[in-house]
Image (tube, rainbow, N blue to C red):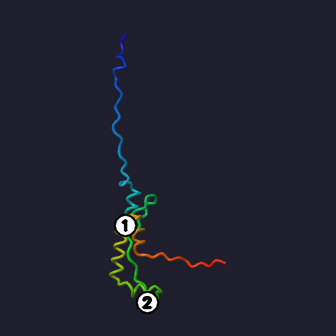
Amino acid sequence: MTELAPTSTLTPSKRGRKKHINEKGWKRNIAKRLRISRKEYQTSKRRRTSSERHLKEPCKDTCKFKFGTNITESQQLQLNEDYWTLGSIQKTMEFYCKFCERCYAITSFY
């Protein structure tokens, strides 16, 4: 009869360190970063590609806000570039607060 070696001499395998989560490398976060910065990106679920965003044509003279006369085309391009290079939603909200005034609606109480 052959004798088996005792099992107590075997040591359990050691577990290594836990891996750190790299959320910046996830596909949906990459797409989100590209979407916020107006670049071309691919959606995470349906794999549709969205094209890069461009500045539209300036307003005509019939516009009630008169953006075409108040702001030159080069200023429009500069504002657009400044806005889209911010890169985060929080910074875009701060950009809005910096350049916009809050208008309160006039309400009448009976």
Q: Quadrant of the N terminus?
A: top left
Q: In which quarter of the image is the C terminus?
A: bottom right
Specify the quadrant of the image occupied by residue 73. Answer: bottom left
Examine the rendered structure and indicate whether residue 76 appears above or below residue 27: below
Q: Name the residue under label 2.
A: 61
Along the line of sight, which residue is nearer the eye, 73 or 91?
91
Along the line of sight, which residue is nearer the eye, 68 or 27?
68
Q: Is mark 2 on a helix, strand or loop?
A: loop
Q: Where is residue 35 in the image (x, y as percent from the top left)?
A: 40, 65
Q: Mark 1 points at which residue?
A: 37
6 vs 104, left or right, is: left
Examine the rendered structure and indicate whether residue 16 appears above or below residue 5: below
Q: Which residue lies furthest to the bottom in this view?
A: 61
Tally of numbered discs = 2
Q: Is mark 1 on a helix, strand or loop?
A: loop
Circle 2 crowding by C-alpha within 10 Å: few under 14, some 14–19, many from 20: few
Looking at the image, which residue is at 34% across and 32% down?
14
Q: Where is residue 8 in the image (x, y as percent from the top left)?
A: 36, 20
Specify the quadrant of the image occupied by residue 5. Answer: top left
Looking at the image, which residue is at 40% across and 83% down?
58
Q: The disc labelled 2 sits on which kind of residue?
A: Asp
Rendered image: mark on residue 6: none
Looking at the image, which residue is at 43% across and 58% down?
44
Q: The disc labelled 1 sits on which kind of residue?
A: Ser
Q: Position of residue 69 (x, y in %)?
A: 39, 88
Nearer the N terminus, badge 2 or badge 1? 1
Q: Which residue lies furthest to the front in this view?
A: 110
Specify the quadrant of the image occupied by residue 15. Answer: top left
Circle 1 crowding by C-alpha within 10 Å: few under 14, some 14–19, many from 20: some
Q: Distance between the residues labelled 2 and 1?
A: 30 Å
